[in-house]
Image: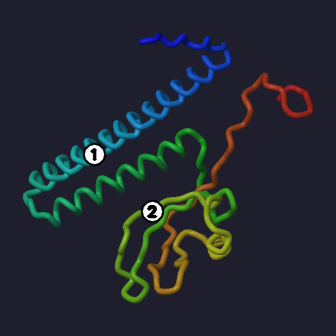
Amino acid sequence: MEKKEKKPVTASQRLEGLEAAVSMLDQSLANITSNLQKTVDAVNLISKRVEAIVRAADAGSLTSQSVSAQVVNMNIEELKEKVDSLISQGVAVPSEQIQENSFVVGRELDPSSKDIQNPRLQFPVFGLKPETKEKLMGKKVGDLIDIEEGRNTLEITELYNIVIPAQSQGQTNLEGTQA
């Protein structure tokens, strides 16, 4: 049997091989990270559910409805904490009416009965579709808005303006002078 001589590999070919290997490793790492995040999310969901079961049991009513109500209450608490954090950081300040830079907190009501369908939702206005923004602009706390025909009504419960933090002292502004 005759032995084949290996053709010498150029530096460029070696780099291409390394780039391909690094790319495969990067993709594998991304997949592992994604799977790990899904696992963390599942564990957090289970943890929240267990806490809701404990709260419902402590309240003396361990039914599926009471556990679900506890989960909803915990979600509301979590959302309130996020807004409180934005306020304490000075990123959100109370506002009178909705503007382009507003952060809206509200709840969804059944259009006919006005029963609460979703006790809390919150969102920044800047990421909305133009036609949705148009319906919201200028609205105030307590206003009821029909965003889409046949869907729940939005009741505005809190309004904030998103504030971009000022430059720290000593930094140069665009004109090159000290702020």
Residue 138 screen position, x and y as percent? 67, 71
Residue 36 screen position, x and y as percent? 34, 36
Above-or-below relation of 58 to 122:
above
Q: Secondary structure at mark 2?
A: strand
| Residue underneath mark 2 | 121
Query: Which label was assigned to residue 94?
Result: none
Q: Secondary structure at mark 1?
A: helix
Residue 117 screen position, x and y as percent? 36, 74
Q: Disc 2 vs disc 1: Cβ atoms closer than 8 Å?
A: no
Q: Residue type at mark 2?
A: Leu
Q: Earlier in the sequence, mark 2 or mark 1?
A: 1
Residue at 60% of width from left, 17% of height from top?
Answer: 14
Residue at 7% of width from left, 58% of height from top?
Answer: 60
| Residue underneath mark 1 | 42
Residue at 17% of width from left, 47% of height from top?
Answer: 50
Above-or-below relation of 52 to 111:
above
Residue 115 occupies quadrant: bottom left
Residue closest to the far front? 1
Q: Residue type at mark 1?
A: Ala
For the residue pair 22 and 125, the one nearer the viewer reads as 22
Above-or-below relation of 88 to 106:
above
- Crowd around label 2: few <14 · some 14–19 · many ≥20 (10 Å): some
User: Left or right: 131 with respect to 171?
Assistant: left
Residue 80 screen position, x and y as percent? 42, 52
For the residue pair 24 and 84, the one nearer the viewer reads as 24
Residue at 61% of width from left, 14% of height from top?
Answer: 9
User: Left or right: 60 with respect to 42?
Assistant: left
User: Left or right: 63 with respect to 137?
Assistant: left
- Crowd around label 1: few <14 · some 14–19 · many ≥20 (10 Å): few
Cα–Cα gap, marks 2 and 1: 22 Å
